């Protein structure tokens, strides 16, 4: 059956290849969408649009109760026991209830939320429209995490890309004819509604064929275990979302919505790096979770170190290329209105490269079932971010926001590294040395390029940064990937 074929599990290499393909395609479309939105809306309306998309994921994070975040950890476990259908039935009921409740609360408090987010009641309608997005967004995330937990990344990627493509196409069309922030918000709502309708049917058909996965869950305290694991994925993403928007939220108050739009463009340009960087973390967690369940903890630690090194180095090269050509990119694609974003691109590249590191190591908290660790570390960073943005923005404006945010995220990584070290995650000195390499972007483009060449020479000429065993592992993986590509072409 076709459902059996599309739900066939993939290896780490296959998963990474699938996600890379869709990520590249998505990045091309996202760049085009961002250019159209920025040029047609202008900095002020683009700033409104940005803050609206701060509210939506924040509300969704609360609505989903953190439960989809446990799927990568527990779907392999309950699938092995034959309880998969019962597990999904119980968890989805909780998720959908939270989504409906959150939608109603936000919709009927739109004016109050408009005052909080925009410091004005004039954006009540855009908050109401955003509120209607909460429920379909919650279901979308649940489906995506279900596919990831089942290790069918092709389906998770197709789901993600389908929503993205519909949003992009419809969003561009609406923005051209109705150049205001409401247009992309409406397009986003429609895209979620359409994809959840299609993919929910596909998922139901697949589950209907799993007769062996309908065993009743006999364990006591099921909901207690799920909530104990998931509760931190309510607070941690809230902290993460507020952290990521603290700079723009404060810029709106200390400067203007136009300044928010300009700052957002710098974030978008540098954020290209994280879009590729998140592939490693997204693919790694479900696979090392499976390895962890098999009891091979040393292999998990090896894979985490290996992923941190290789992922950071590849991303660093891409970031350097972007840094060298940032002026023509902004000038040609976004226009003269956004040239003030250029000075902060380097600092924000450091921020996004640090995000890529976080995306890999944070999953360790799920393996050891101590998901409060990212929460506590994130809270430390959030407090720092609020304080530093409050101090720096009035004095240094956009650069102050970029520096404050990057320093604060660095504190999160340091705190998490020290904590995980006590919990058995041994990050090698050579791995740490690679993870701090993004600091080259505090210098100008020429010095950054010079430092990168020196580091690359050390990597190729010595085994200190990347060991011979790791180099051999990388060669084998690349050779295997190329062989599969050739095999696919020959067919």
Image: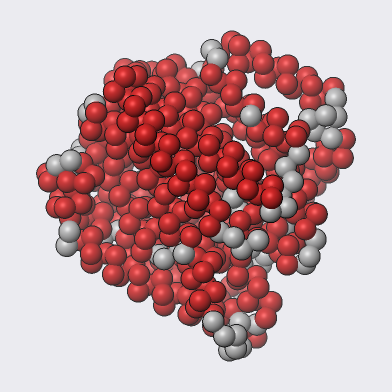
State which quadrant residue 355 falls in. top right
What's the coloring here? secondary structure
Looking at the image, which residue is at 69% across and 47% down?
Answer: 421
Looking at the image, which residue is at 31% across and 19% down?
Answer: 395
Instruction: Tell me where residue 390 appears, x and y as whole percent.
Output: 32, 31
Instruction: Tell me where residue 216 appears, x and y as whole percent.
Output: 58, 89
Q: Is residue 467 left or right of residue 205?
A: right
Say which of 403 and 147 sits in front. 403
Q: Is residue 309 left or right of residue 408?
A: right
Say which of 446 and 196 sits in front. 446
Identify the image quadrant of the N terminus. bottom right
Instruction: Tell me where residue 359 appears, x and y as whole percent.
Output: 57, 46
Quick check: can you spot residue 463?
Answer: yes
State which quadrant residue 249 falls in. top left
Looking at the image, which residue is at 76% across and 33% down?
Answer: 430
325 is higher (above) or lower (below) than 42: above
**Residue that extends furthest to the top in the rendered view of this protein:** 446
Say which of 62 and 232 sits in front. 232
**Residue that extends furthest to the front in the rendered view of this protein:** 422
Say which of 141 and 7 sits in front. 141
State which quadrant residue 262 falls in. top left
Q: Is residue 58 left or right of residue 114?
A: right
460 is higher (above) or lower (below) than 410: above
Instruction: Tell me where residue 195 appears, x and y as whole percent.
Output: 41, 62
Q: How many marks?
A: 0
Looking at the image, which residue is at 59% across and 50% down?
Answer: 362
Quick check: can you spot residue 276?
Answer: no
């Amino acid at each position: 059956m076709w459902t059996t074929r599309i739900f066939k599990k993939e290896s780490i290499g296959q998963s990474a290849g699938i996600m890379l393909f869709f990520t590249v395609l998505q990045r091309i479309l996202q760049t085009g969408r961002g250019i159209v939105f920025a040029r047609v809306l202008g900095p002020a309306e683009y700033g409104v649009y940005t803050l609206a998309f701060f509210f939506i994921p924040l509300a969704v994070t609360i609505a989903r109760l953190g439960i989809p975040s446990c799927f990568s950890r527990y779907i392999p476990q309950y699938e092995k026991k034959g309880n998969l259908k019962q597990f999904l039935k119980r968890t989805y009921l909780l998720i959908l209830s939270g989504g409906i409740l959150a939608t109603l609360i936000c919709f009927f408090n739109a004016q109050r939320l408009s005052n909080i987010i925009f410091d004005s009641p004039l954006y009540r309608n855009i908050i109401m429209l955003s509120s209607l997005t909460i429920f379909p967004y919650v279901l979308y995330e649940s489906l995506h995490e279900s596919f990831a937990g089942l290790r069918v990344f092709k389906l998770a990627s197709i789901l993600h890309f389908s929503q993205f493509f519909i949003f992009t196409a419809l969003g561009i069309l609406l923005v051209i004819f109705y150049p205001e922030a409401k247009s992309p918000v409406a397009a986003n709502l429609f895209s979620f509604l359409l994809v959840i309708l299609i993919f929910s049917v596909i998922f139901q058909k697949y589950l209907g064929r799993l007769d062996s996965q309908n065993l009743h869950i006999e364990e006591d305290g099921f909901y207690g275990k799920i909530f104990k694991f998931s509760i931190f994925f309510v607070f941690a993403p809230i902290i993460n979302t507020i952290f990521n928007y603290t700079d723009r939220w404060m810029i709106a108050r200390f400067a203007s919505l136009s300044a928010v739009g300009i700052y957002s463009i710098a974030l978008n340009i540098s954020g290209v790096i994280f879009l590729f960087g998140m592939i490693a973390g997204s693919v790694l967690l479900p696979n090392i979770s499976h390895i962890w369940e098999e009891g091979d903890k040393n292999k998990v630690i090896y894979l985490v170190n290996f992923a941190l090194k290789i992922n950071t180095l590849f991303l660093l090269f891409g970031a350097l290329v972007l840094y060298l050509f940032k002026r023509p990119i902004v000038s040609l694609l976004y226009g003269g209105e956004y040239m003030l974003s250029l000075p902060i691109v380097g600092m924000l590249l450091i921020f996004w490269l640090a995000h890529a590191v976080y995306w890999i190591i944070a999953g360790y908290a799920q393996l050891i079932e101590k998901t409060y660790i990212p929460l506590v570390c994130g809270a430390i960073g959030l407090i720092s971010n609020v304080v530093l943005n409050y101090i720096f923005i009035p004095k240094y404006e956009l650069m102050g926001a970029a520096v404050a945010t990057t320093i604060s995220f660095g504190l999160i990584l340091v705190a998490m590294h020290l904590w995980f070290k006590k919990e058995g995650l041994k990050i090698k000195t050579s791995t740490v040395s690679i993870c701090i390499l993004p600091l080259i972007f505090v210098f100008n483009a020429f010095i950054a390029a010079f430092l990168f060449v020196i580091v690359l020479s050390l990597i190729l000429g010595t085994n200190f940064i990347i060991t011979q065993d790791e180099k051999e592992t990388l060669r084998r993986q690349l050779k295997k990937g190329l062989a599969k590509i050739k095999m696919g072409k020959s067919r």
